Structures are given as C-alpha cells and as structure tokens.
Image (cartoon, rainbow, N blue to C red):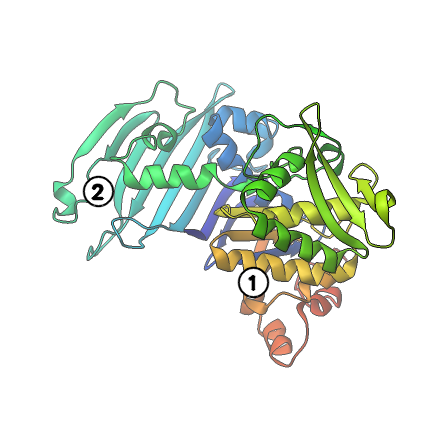
Amino acid sequence: MHIETIRLRNFKAFKAIEMKNIPKFCVIVGANGAGKTTLFGAIAFLKHAMTYNVRDALDNMGGFEEVISRGAKDRVIKIELQIRMEIAGKLPLVTYGLEIGAENGTAFVSKEYLKYRRHKQVGNPFNFLKFENGRGYAIRNEEDLTKNVEDLEREYQNLDNNAILAIKGLGQFERFTAARQLRQLIENWHISDFHISAARGSKEAMGLEDHLSPSGDNLQRVAYKLYQTHPSIFKQVVKRMARSVPGISRVVPTKTIDRRIILTFADAAFTGENQNFIDTVVSDGTMKMFAYLLLLYDPHPHPVLCIEEPENQLYPKLLGELAEEMQAYSQKGGQVFVSTHSPDFLNAVGLDSVYWLAKKRGYSDIQRAKDNEQVKAYMNDGDLMGNLWKQGFFDGADPK
C-alpha cells in the first residue's frame, strides 16, 4: 500500500493543491512558512481523526477557523487521497475523500466516500462507501467478483456522532474490505515528533512495545524488545551506529533490579567500566541517530513514515547516509515523507523524489522537481539536488 495522490482544499495555507504520482520516498523542501509542516499536519490530522474524531483533531490544531484557509468562500475543508491497496488479490487505486463543514461553531463530517474500479470495471470508480452528514451506506460483499457492481449489497447505517469517520466504525468489520484496510493503514501511520528530552532516561520495563512512539519516549522499551526478540536486527542497528557515531562500539538495553530499562552506550576509546555511558550523558545527535535507526530497522515497517527536518542535531556528513537508509526503508514496503532544509540530505536524493513548496499570493503551491526542465537538465548533467536547491534553482522557493 502507498499514497499516490494527495489533494487538499481549504486546509490552512493550501487553498487547492494536488500532489500526483507520489513516490515511495518523498522529500519536501521549501522556505520557512512555505507549508511543509502544514502538509505533514494534514497527514497527522487524518490519523488523529481516525483515533478520536474530526472535532478533536481540529481542536488539536486550534479549531475549525484556524484550519480552514483564510478567505475560503465555500467554507468546507476537503482532503482526498488516492492509495494503491490490495483487494481480492488485485491492486486498485482507491480514492478516499473527506469533507468537513461547520455550523454554529461546531464542525462535522459533511461528506465521506471511498471508491475504486473493480476488476474489469469501466467508467467512473464505484462508491463502496458513501456518507453525508452521518448517514450513508457501505458495500458488504465487495470481494465477490462474480457480481456486477449494480448487484452488490448496500448496508445502510446512521452514525451516532457526525464528527466520527465512517471508516473508523465500519472498518472494524471484515465484510467492509476496503474500509477495514484503509482504517488499518491510517492507524499505523507514524508522524515523528521526536523530543530528545523525552527519549532520555530509564523507563519502566512494563509494557514493552514494538514501535517507537512519535515523541520517542518509549525508546528504551522498544530497544529492549528488539534486543530480545530480533537480536540479529538489533546487531544491524548497532553496527550502523558504529559507522555513524565515532567511538560507539556497543549499545545495550538493560533491565535493572527495580524493573526499569536503561540504555548504555559503550565508547571504544575507554576500557572496563569507564567504557559505558548511560543515555542521559551521550550527545543529542547520538540519541537521535539511534532513534531513527530503530524506526528504519523496525521488523514491521509503518506503511507511512513522516519525519520533519531530520538534520537537526545531526552532523552533516550523516545526512546522506540517513537519506539512503530512508530510501531502503521505502523499498521494504513503508512509504517515507521527509521535509528538510539540508543540502547535504538533498544531495543523496534523486530527481524523482523531490517536491518543493512556494508561497504565491498568500497560499502554498507545490511543484515536483522532475517536472522542472531546468532542474531536470542539470541533474541529467550530473549536478546534485542539494547544490541546485542551495543555488536557488527551485523556482519560487527562495524566500528572497
């Protein structure tokens, strides 16, 4: 599964944008305030709305009036994704759309739909889920390819709360295949909001976890679980750390007598007990690199991984290697979105992966590097993407 198209309308600085043919490894650049955080915010919004509801997700971003684009005449926030998903052994392009309005200061889902073309279907995609103002239907035998679309069975439902996503409720049931798979996909997105201060220090050993949390506050528990259950993968992480951080020869998550977990880094420059340093005293860059490697070597990759500005606290030379690790992660099955200001990171990225954002008349616009003939020509002649970005060849992206 991966996202191929994102369309946003009236979502903060995005009055109307469309990202098409999105690659598995997608890198976003742009000046401060161009909309990089907003783009990631739209992805985070969908996950938050799935976990709770649309009103809660809006409140988390300041409320409906703060999210809807200024000057929007139709007063409706629209998000639409096109996702390649496996259904009945096929890989149709599934379109999921969400429209949000507000009345008397209260937000609600005015429209929600999920549609795709079945095998051998011609014409417009068929709606397998369609709700308006909390009422609608979903197809419950969509995998029965012996039936024509007009013969499929609709199951009508009324939602108790018109701020709840229909795919959240119906996606719990096996009979609604696409809704269930889409729900699982969105629930497993990872939008990183890593805080080094939250990641440091011993953690309670109870509740060992498989995946790193967005803030990284369960870093020790995830490391310990990987160390215990996938030792070969953990060794790969440590080996990768040793190449990236001078002196690091070993990383060991240890359970203490009072059932807490501490993370110890060994420095090869010292011997005996002097060799070991707990995570509270190692550098910010060491902590961040280790956290990223735990994410990227996860034995069960997230279907979508979003990371903002990975260059912060990291030595520039490491950024090219990190870009290569993210590219490898995307090839294993997880789609990666990254925003960056770093030419060093961009220099390790190919033409097909890069988009840039620019403000035009107060709203954000998006362009793909491969669609710019000048950038494409320079790259074909052997130039590096980061150098072109630094020299101002990304039209409209330079704040000057």
Residue 385 higher or lower than 182, as above or below: below
Label 2: few (<14), some (14–19) or many (≥20) C-alpha neighbours in 10 Å: many
The amino acid type of the residue labelled 1 equals: Ser
What residue is shown with label 2? 142
Q: Distance between the Cα atoms at labels 1 and 2?
A: 34 Å
Task: Using residue 131 as the reference point, say whether residue 361 is left or right of it.
Answer: right
> Residue most toward the bottom?
381
How many residues crowd around disc 1 within 10 Å: few (fewer than 14), some, or many (20 or more)?
some
Give the percent coordinates (x, y) of residue 337: 57, 51
Does dot 1 land on a helix, a strand or a loop? helix
Secondary structure under the numbered disc 2 in the rendered image: loop
Residue 302 visible: yes
- Between residues 225 and 184, which one lies in front from this camera angle? 225
Q: Nearer the viewer, residue 294 or 306?
A: 294
Mark earlier in primary sequence (1, 2): 2
**Quadrant of residue 355 in the image?**
bottom right
Residue 196 falls left or right of residue 230:
right
Residue found at x 48% / y 25%: 52
From the image, tell me which residue sits under label 1.
Answer: 353
Q: Position of residue 14 (x, y in %)?
A: 56, 45
Tell me the amino acid under the disc marked 2: Glu
Query: In this rendering, is residue 58 above or below 1?
Result: above
Depth check: give the residue in front, 322 or 12. 322
Quadrant of the image occupied by residue 67: top right
On screen, residue 182 versus residue 275, left or right, reads left
**Looking at this view, is 261 or 88 the one in front?**
261
Determine the image quadrant of residue 136: top left
Residue 381 placement, left or right of 15: right
> Quadrant where the C terminus lies?
bottom right
